[in-house]
Image (cartoon, coloured by chain):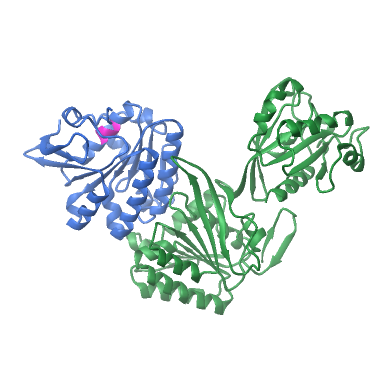
Amino acid sequence: MEGIKTGFKNFDQLTNGLDYRKVYSLFGDKESGKEQFLYKLVQSALSSNIAVVYVLTSKSYSELINEFNSRGININPYLGESFKILDDFSRTNSPSATDNAYAKILNGPIDLTGLSVSLSSVNSDFIKDAKPVINIFDNLSNLLIYNNPVTVYRFLQFVCGKDKLAGVTILFSVDTAMHPPEVIETIKNLSDAILDLKLQDGKRYFKLSGTTKEVLEFKELE
Amino acid sequence: MAYYKGLDGVSEEDLDPYFGIAKLDEQLKGIPPKKVVLISASPSVGNEVFGYQIIHKNITSGVKVLVFLNRTSPQSYLTDMKEYDFPPNDNLVIIDAYSGITGIKSEETDHIRVINNPYDKEEVKTKIIKELNEGYGLLVIDSFSLLADFFDFSFAISFMNDIKQVIVAKESAAVLLFTDWGYEKQNVDKLLSNVNSTIEIKGIEKRVIFGQYFAVLKCDWLEEKPTFSSVLFKAIKPGGIRVYFPKILVTGPTDAGKSSFIHSASKNAVSVDKLGGTIALDHGTVDFEGYRADLFGTPGQERFDPLLKMLGGEAIGVFLVVDSTKPEQFPRAVEMLRKTETYGLPVVVIANKADLKGALKKEELREKLHLDSAITLVQTVAEDLSKVDPNEPTKLKEVNIHEALSALFKQLT
């Protein structure tokens, strides 16, 4: 079965894309190209009629949309249709911010219940529309900074369990340098598949484990 | 002074805080002084709207409410409350145990107390106890599970016991909002044994959530356990928690006034009709005294009888609408109950057009319909006969509609 294409040619050829119903963790340092990977994945998924729920923890929904636009990705036709944003950041600066048609404004990184409830509800809406769904967490690091790691693990266990039951694919982006090795290890243990990105000599590389078609040595991401 | 106006329309006044949530107040009669209530929710459903509604009910009834808030900022909290149409007033004081975590600057006001270092157990405990001693009718902790996450479960339990002492001394009460993330069973059991009442909130879910319900698991101030096991609800924005009846059937002979009843009872009714007579179905959503119900109307014409069984499926109650001036249609009315397979369900008979010439009196209606004395019969009349348009459902008098809704909802709860 064809997976979810990421929009990166050699990645999709070598891995067959992201497997449905799997939990992916995306690790990399600040310059490794995680955001570029996520944005291209969003574009590719949406153009294949896959619904995307994008959880934001370190920027606002308007900043995200600007970033898509600045990269020439026309996200507007999908907003509120098959692309919904759970914005867990805006209220840090604007406590009175409220929802709109495509962005649900959450309370911030501490309120994991609010995030879990919203995620269930938005996923349910897409599933009822018979759409395949991917949940993208950009990023998990901010949740880990503000909460006790055990609390975040409990949250992840719940969310991953629910998403799997619902047939939803899930991808967590993690800034490797921000967390001690034991935290990284636990997140890996909670995931089905691990995707590593790195920047070397101006080029981006990836490797992937835990999927049907693994790429265990770093290959260039094109 | 808090009170709850139930389906009987009777105000029960005393000094206790109330939930402001249909069914809970009817069964538990509010929250007596010195009692602690735990509202425990599954992480995919959430309990925050229960908190907003309880706060709103009490502050608008003159009860002073203290909210310990560690989930979000007071500004965001109040924004969310307003979205449910629950604006704050002077009876609400919030202890802000959130802003210090995120680095947002928060200033004390008449209605906001600030915990500078929410990671400091002593400051958290001292500040809340000091404030409680100022005299509040109700304390709401939103959220208690976050308190356990932040520190540990044993601190959360000892914190609750310290607070309980002040609550008992000051004749106050407390509501703890708790998300059960799958904590260790012994910790949760200890928590449950330390509270006076536990209300559980869960979703009915498989791949998707297709319903939410609450249930009273424990209540030590009632001599008998409440008679309900679980109650479906919806959280409506604006409006808050509504006890929810997913399907109530409205049936009866042609031109008795079924569409009029549905359109008068609900704000958003739609009819699939042709020249005034319903040929497929009517639907309307009713909001009444903390309850929400979806009404489904059947066509009355005999040629649609094959549809009736399907339309009646899954209904949990029935409004049987008859024309008071047409007793010759009454056998057809009873036949429709049988054809919709709703005979034996809770039913309220609506005797419409009760003010028209030739309308039967109540006792005559009962006799001709062979109504058991336990079945409620409500007479309805048009709001303004001069405005009756044959192509539009006629509006019925609100007082009649309320009497009918109240009678059926009481049977369903």
**Lateral position of residue B107 relative to residue A68, left or right:** right
Residue nearest the viewer, comparing B398 with B244:
B244
**Lateral position of residue A90 relative to residue B193, left or right:** left
Q: What's the residue at 55%, 50% (across, down)?
A: B213
**Lateral position of residue B253 relative to residue B172, left or right:** right
Can I make out residue B5 in this image?
yes
Which residue lies most toward the left here? A201
Q: Where is residue A87 shown, x and y percent of the image?
A: 37, 45
Which residue lies most toward the bottom here? B169
Q: Where is residue A120 shown, x and y percent of the image?
A: 42, 44
The shade of chain A is blue
Q: Quadrant of the N terminus of chain B?
A: bottom right
Is B227 included in the stretch rendered in magenta?
no
**Colour-to-chain, green:** B
For the magenta stretch, what is the residue range? A39-43
Q: Quadrant of residue B216?
A: bottom right
Q: Is residue B378 above or below residue B89?
A: above
